[in-house]
């Protein structure tokens, strides 16, 4: 039997941690069990492979979606902007105008 997880239960079960928020968007990050190795300072070091997701809410349906973004992004706004790489936008002005 398929058990449905709510959004907050999914975030908890997946071990996702809130890194930042911007309006209704939340940047979530997690280190996976997979390891990436590299040679640094005359030693072999393994670090967890990170993943990052942007939790967004559709303004018309109010459904929650998760967009995979680069784990290099530091803010939710930067993650949001990375989903539309060829689009320049004044998010503060446009989001206020749309709502």
Image (spheres, rainbow, N blue to C red):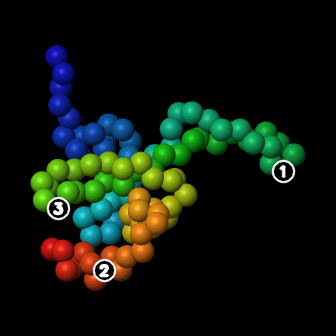
Choose top left, top right, bottom left or bottom right for residue 11: top left
Q: Do the residues labelled 2 and 1 touch (CB within 8 Å)?
A: no
Mark closest to the chain's N terminus, 3 or 1: 1
Please give the name of the residue rendered at 27% of the width and 49% of the height, measured from the top-left corner. 65
Residue 77 lies, in percent from the top left, at: 39, 69
Give the quadrant of the C terminus: bottom left
The kind of secondary structure element at disc 2 is helix
Q: Residue 59 carries which label?
A: 3
Q: Nearer the viewer, mark 2 or mark 1?
A: 2
Mark closest to the chain's N terminus, 2 or 3: 3
Q: Which of marks 3 and 1 is in front?
A: 3
Q: Mark 1 points at which residue?
A: 41
Residue 15 lies, in percent from the top left, at: 38, 42
Give the quadrant of the N terminus: top left
Q: Do the residues labelled 2 and 3 touch (CB within 8 Å)?
A: no
Please give the name of the residue rendered at 32% of the width and 69% of the height, measured from the top-left corner. 22
Residue 52 lies, in percent from the top left, at: 45, 50
Please give the name of the residue rendered at 50% of the width and 61% of the height, measured from the top-left corner. 73
Q: Mark 2 points at which residue?
A: 92
Q: Residues within 10 Å of mark 1 (few under 14, many from 20)?
A: few
Please give the name of the residue rendered at 36% of the width and 38% of the height, measured from the top-left corner. 14
């Amino acid at each position: 039997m398929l058990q449905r997880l709510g959004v907050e239960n999914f975030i908890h079960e997946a071990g996702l941690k809130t890194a930042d928020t911007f309006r209704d968007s939340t940047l979530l990050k997690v280190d996976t069990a997979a390891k990436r190795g590299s040679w640094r300072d005359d030693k072999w070091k393994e670090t967890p492979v990170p993943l990052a997701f942007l939790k967004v809410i559709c303004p018309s349906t109010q459904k929650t979606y998760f967009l995979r973004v680069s784990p290099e992004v530091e803010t939710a706004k930067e993650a949001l902007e990375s989903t539309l790489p060829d689009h320049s936008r004044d998010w503060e002005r446009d989001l206020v105008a749309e709502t």
